[in-house]
Every structure is written in C-alpha cells, then in structure tokens.
Image: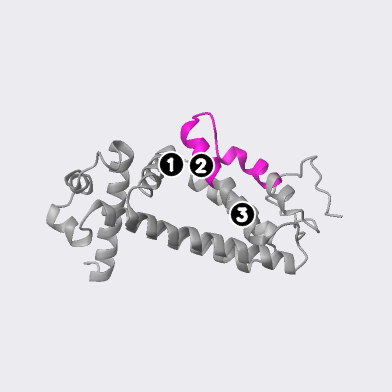
Amino acid sequence: MRMPNVELQTERRRQILRAAERCFTRSGFHGTGMQEVCLEAGMSAGNVYRYFRSKTEIIAAIIDEERQRIAAQFAALSTAESFLGALSDLIDQHLADHANREHLAMWAEVLSEISRNAEIAAVYAGLERDMRAAMTRAVERAIERGEIAPTMDPATVAVLLLSLGDGLCARAGVDIEVSLPALAEAVKQWSRLLLRPLKPPVQRETDPAPSQLVVEPAS
C-alpha cells in the first residue's frame, strides 16, 4: 500500500536530513556539497531540491527538529509533580542522546556555522530562547512549591544548568575517555548542590542508592 502524500513527504525530508548529518559528520559542513547529500540519500538532485534549496536550509531544518524534540522534553519538566525527579530523568535522557560521538561531531559543525551564517544563527537563537525560558519556568515553579531554595535568580539557575549540559557535550566531543552516561549521577549531585533542595527528592525503585554527599538546606 502506498504511503499518503504527507507521510511520504515527511519521510523523504527525514531521509535527506539523516543523509546530510552523515555527510556533515564525515566531510564537515563546508566540505559537503549538495551532490554528496543526494548520493548519500539515494535521491536525485531534483528530488532533494524539492525539499531543500541549500545546505543552510538543511541545517535550519535539523535545528528545528531539535527544537521540537527538546520542547517535548522540557514540557514534561515544567509540568512534573517533582522538579528534581523530572530533572533527573532529563539529565539521563540528554546524556544518553549525546553519547554518540558522530552525533556530537555533527552538532559541532552546526554550531560552528552560527558565527558565520546569520540565518542559521537566528534559527538557533530561537532554540536557545525556548530552552532558557522553559528551564526558567520550571525552576520558578519548583521555588514556588518550596521544592528548592530561592538562592539565585531562576533565569541564572537555568543558564547554569543548560551550560553544564553544553559543556559536558563539548568535553565528550574532544576527549574520547569521557562517557556521558557514566557521568549522570555526578551531574545530578552537582545540580542538587546548585539548587539546594528543601525536601528530599522522591526515591524511585530504579534510582541508585544515594551517595554519601549530603546537601544541607539553605539557612
């Protein structure tokens, strides 16, 4: 049975984007031509150009995909009953999502274009605004519920938490001995030091035993 037209177009777009990611990882953004993307996708140039007229449009679409994926993750963080529990899940998911070094290399190519290409910079700025705003709202809500101490401005806390994730991914991209999933529990403990929880997070059956590190509530 043939795919409905909308589903087929969505699948074709996805096919091109995954092919472009492999090309960018292998050859770099500037070392990749549209013809290479066509060959990698197994599609004619005319077919590819129906969806994307340039590499810039392809990168913009990759960023937009990431924006939609992160929006879903952060929506759960903002509405969760326990901010600390939801943050723990988000840390696990983020580090697992970025554990693949080819994935990190591809995003390094995307990020390098931000300083050179105003169109890509504008698209990525939207992603950053969404993440910062969603994390800030989640921190504000946790403070209002008395879950964490209001020791810093929520927007500052949001930037610090996001920067921790960014920095770890950058480190893993250049240091082959760094395993992001292996750092998950250390990241959670660092986050609790920053957030100064006023009540202990709910211990779930799947969580590891708590470490000896004790975080005292703010006085």
Q: Is residue 176 above or below residue 128?
A: above
The location of residue 160, given as percent across then percent down, is: 62, 51
Residue that mark 1 sits on:
104
Residue 4 at least partly seen: no
Instruction: Measure the alpha-carbon separation of dots 3 and 2.
Output: 17 Å
Return the mark for residue 169: 2
Task: Check disc 1 and report its element: helix, strand or loop.
Answer: helix
The location of residue 119, given as percent across then percent down, is: 32, 57
Whichever of callouts 2 and 1 sits on the residue coming sooner in the sequence is 1
- Identity of the amino acid at label 3? Asp
Instruction: Measure the alpha-carbon separation of dots 1 and 3.
Output: 21 Å
Whichever of callouts 3 and 2 sits on the residue coming sooner in the sequence is 3
| Of the pair 208 and 179, the residue shown nearer to us | 179
The location of residue 178, given as percent across then percent down, is: 54, 33
From which residue to which does the magenta span run?
166-189
Return the mark for residue 26: none
Side of 84 where 217 appears, left or right: right
| Of the pair 172 and 157, the residue shown nearer to us | 157
Return the mark for residue 89: 3
Mark 3 or 2: in front is: 2
- Dots 2 and 1: beta carbons under 8 Å? yes
Task: Check disc 3 and report its element: helix, strand or loop.
Answer: helix
Q: Is residue 10 above or below residue 205?
A: below
Whichever of callouts 1 and 3 sits on the residue coming sooner in the sequence is 3
Residue count near mark 3 (Cα–Cα under 10 Å), binned few <14, some 14–19, many ≥20: some
Question: In the image, is residue 207 part of the stretch drawn in magenta?
Answer: no
| Of the pair 213 and 114, the residue shown nearer to us | 114
- Identity of the amino acid at label 1? Leu
